[in-house]
Image (cartoon, grey):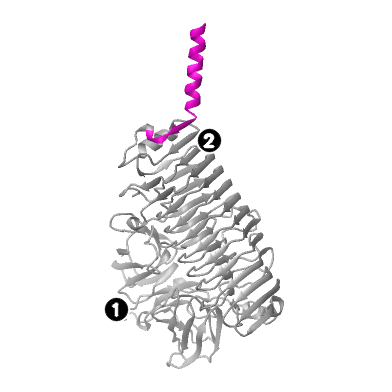
Amino acid sequence: MHLLVLIGVFVTGLCAAAETVNAADYGYNPTNATAALQAAIDSGAKTIIIDAAQGDWCIEPIKLRSNLELIFGENVRVRAVPGAFRKRYAMMFKGMNVTNIKVRGMSGASIEMFKKDYLDADSYVWSEWRHMFAFYDSANISVEGLSLSSSGGDGVYIARCKDVRLENLVCAGHDRQGISVIGAENLLVRQCRFCFTEGTPPQCGIDFEPNSFKEHFVNCLVEDCEFDGNFSNGALFHIPHMNDKSRPLSVKFRNCRFSGNRQCGVRVYVAWNAEKSVRGRIEFDGCVFSGNRNGGITLASMPPKGFSVDFRNSVVDSRGCPEPPIVFDNGELQFDFGGVSFSNVTVYADKPQVLSFHGMTGVGMTNVAGNILIVTPDGSKNLSLEEFAAFHPSDPAAKKFRPAFLKFKKLVARNPDGEPSLITPIYCRGRQFFVQTVPSAGKYPFKFILRKASKHGGAPSEVKVDIFDKVGTPVDSFVITDMEKEYVLESAKANTYLFTVNSRGNECAVVSSLPGQGIRADSRVSICARDGCDLYFVVPASSTKVELEVIASVRSPLSAKILDSSGKVVDSLDKIKEGHIVRIPRNKSVSDEVWRFSVSECSGSGCFDLRIGGNAVSVVSGTSDVILTYGMTEQ
């Protein structure tokens, strides 16, 4: 009987001891301690301690489980194994469908990856997803007290999680984001610093960006945090994937500081469709925006109702910054700007013009409220947002631009004998539709050239190309993974082909030696013209006016001229920073004419959007010698 009691006491003691284990006891290896740490986690112990007694912890990807407390001891340093993390989605700590995870760092605890190594295209497949901590579809998660640096993606990635707390973190020098929030409910981010993000866009401190309308941001609070020195924005909301079927958004920033970011302190981009915009509210209370190079606050694509961004008790200090402190920008979409309020906000500036509005032609302002106190070397004054909006009324008539209908089956080369050496390729960003006619059966070579949008842009990631013939029959489909790809099109007869190319955030040109080619411009196409460019298009003889929709932005001002077939300048644009509708009356002519849109300047990103309206042939070519027209003269 006594023996049984003793055995029971002994077993109970073992079970209690297993509640907390030291990861080093599972076979610490100074070169690669992955096995030891993973074994400790898989042991089922409630608490895992990682201490500095043995030295640095060099690890490869670790899988987290539910009901786990992970404690990083004083001055412990966890590092990525050099040369590891080669897979595109290799993440240091990953939790999927887990609950009740607590990660704590004691004084001096740090985790480091090797971003510079991952950017070496010769050694690593390109990726923006080598995150440090990533949680998917999880709940009751906390991460606190750690310095997280130099991941090949985000310091922390949160997707469709609930009850998440991030506290006392330093997220520094990550490749894509300090933290990405894809979807969260009951999120608390407190007393954290997000700094020096640089590498792959968006390159922000924190980014709220859902992947679909099914994701949501509900009851999210960011409090007492710093966002500084990031290559792009301190905080970014890019939420047009959400819509009226999404749960209403509720996010608040309280007592936060945004300073020294190379773009804006905060940028909010809301909707593609005003009627179907997500509902909800973003609040900034007691925040300071200072020394951000391109302004403190930019609000873009704001619908006039149903969604609001409110600023209270805050300060914007833009002294010494070249751009306006506050920008309202609906220059890319044809709906009125609204849903903004300012209360007890002070702006310190070098000059009194602190507020800038950019809207596509006809777009105005509505549903804005509040006042801003402007302080300059010459004194102070109050600016009423309602009075400012009155200077930017809506103009419904100007919004009625209609793109030209493209008669795709009738397209032919205007000059079948066009000189191949004169062909100038057009670089486009995002989705483009390249058109090419072929004169007969044969094999025709093409080259796809990709280039980064900037020196900080990422390499292409599976850029897909789909090819269709004149009647819409699929011809081929392939993926581009390198900066250049050669391709041979085999055609059984004379035909017209449509190449659908999505270069995503990069720029792509389709290069062909054949005449009869161009880029469709009956829907918006993003043209890259940082070095200037000439775009040629056909105006039918029967046309009585030429219409173009040209969309620049405050970050990429555009200067251009429109020239008729004689080379006469019939209209011009001078450093426009928003959308413009160009309407040029003309007399009917004896024959079709070739007109030219000539860009002399497009700074910043170097891109602008273009659509051709009226009854012009809505295809643009880089050289007049290879232009497309219709097979019969349009009378």
**Nearer mark to the viewer, of 2 and 1:** 2
On the picture, is 16 further left or further right than 488?
A: right
Residue occupying image coordinates x 40% and y 75%: 518
Residue beneath disc 2? 67
Question: Mark 2 is on which residue type?
Answer: Asn
**Is residue 10 one of those drawn in magenta?**
yes
Q: Quick check: marks 2 and 1 in contact, CB under 8 Å?
A: no
Residue under pointer 1: 420
Decide which of 171, 355 is in the foreground and name it.
171
Across and down, in percent, residue 117 comes to 32, 56
Q: Is residue 529 visible?
A: yes
Magenta residue span: 1-24
At label 2, counting other C-alpha atoms closer than 10 Å, the crowd grade (few under 14, some 14-19, many 20 or more) is some
Local SS, label 1:
helix
If you read the primary sequence from the N terminus, does the residue marked by circle 2 or circle 1 appear first? 2
Residue 283 percent across, percent down from the top left: 65, 62
Q: Is residue 137 left or right of residue 285?
A: left
